[in-house]
Amino acid sequence: MKDFLINQRLSGPFVLDTQAPQIRSNSSPAPAIAGLRAIALAVVVLVAVVGSLLAVRWLEPMDPYAASVLELAGNRDRGQAIFLENCAGCHGAEALGAVGPRLVGVSERRSSEQIIEQVVSGRTPPMPQFQPAPQDMADLLTYLKQL
Ligand code: HEC
């Protein structure tokens, strides 16, 4: 009878009950470890968020208009003519600046895409929004890049 009781304890639900507190104590670690885990988790989340933001930027397809402009070979002299007609009034015939900023060396501080964006976006009044045909924009860009 005694043996039977012991057997029942080892194999019955009572054995599981005695293990339960151990499992619980494993899942709630000391506060210091919990703090480290929280920091590690925060770092992982931060890296994931920043990483995905960068990935979105890298993977972002180039604006189709800009892409079509950049595929074309530009003609500097045509570009200069377009500049004198449309841009010189504000930026100066020599692009030294007037109402608009000096554009000499603009390609050192702006990428080709940014220059195209500047010309077609109209986002910085008083500079108007231009809608040049891709070839005209390519010519203009070639001119601007050698300033
Ligand atoms: C009505 C005046 C005006 C005309 C016309 C104009 N711009 Fe501008 N442009 C500006 C002004 C003002 C800014 C500065 C905008 C700002 O950043 O707030 C500017 C900025 C720029 C910039 C950015 C310069 C930099 O250092 O980041 C570029 C590039 C540019 N213009 C190119 C052109 C081109 C090319 C044309 C002709 C197709 C043109 N602009 C016509 C007034 C003008």
Image (cartoon, rainbow, N blue to C red):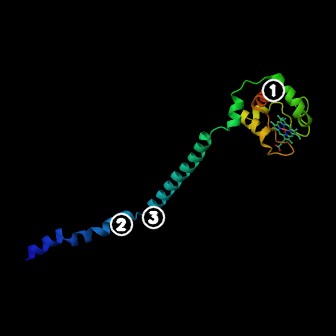
Residue located beneath label 1 in the image: 143
Question: What is the spatial separation of the Cα atoms under label 1 and label 3, in whole angstroms?
Answer: 64 Å
Helix, strand or loop at label 1? It is: helix
- Is residue 27 found left or right of 107 in the rendered image? left
Q: Is mark 3 within 8 Å of ligand 1?
A: no
Answer with mark 1 or mark 3, whichever residue precedes in sequence: 3
Q: Are marks 3 and 2 in contact (CB under 8 Å)?
A: no
Marks 3 and 2 sit apart, C-alpha to C-alpha, by 12 Å
Count numbered badges in the picture.
3
Callouts 1 and 2 close, C-beta under 8 Å: no
- The residue drawn where x is 86% and y is 30% is 83
* Residue closer to the observer: 105 or 83: 83
Q: Amino acid at mark 3?
A: Pro
Do tag 1 and tag 3 residues touch (Cβ < 8 Å)? no
Disc 1 to disc 2, C-alpha distance: 72 Å
Q: Tell me if I can see residue 87 in this picture.
A: no
Give percent across and percent down for residue 4: 10, 73
- Residue 23 x, y percent position in the rendering: 32, 65
Q: What's the residue at 17%, 68% (across, down)?
A: 11
What's the amino acid at mark 2? Answer: Ser
Above or below for 144 versus 2: above
Q: Secondary structure at mark 2?
A: helix
The residue that label 3 is drawn on is 31
Quadrant of the image occupied by residue 115: top right
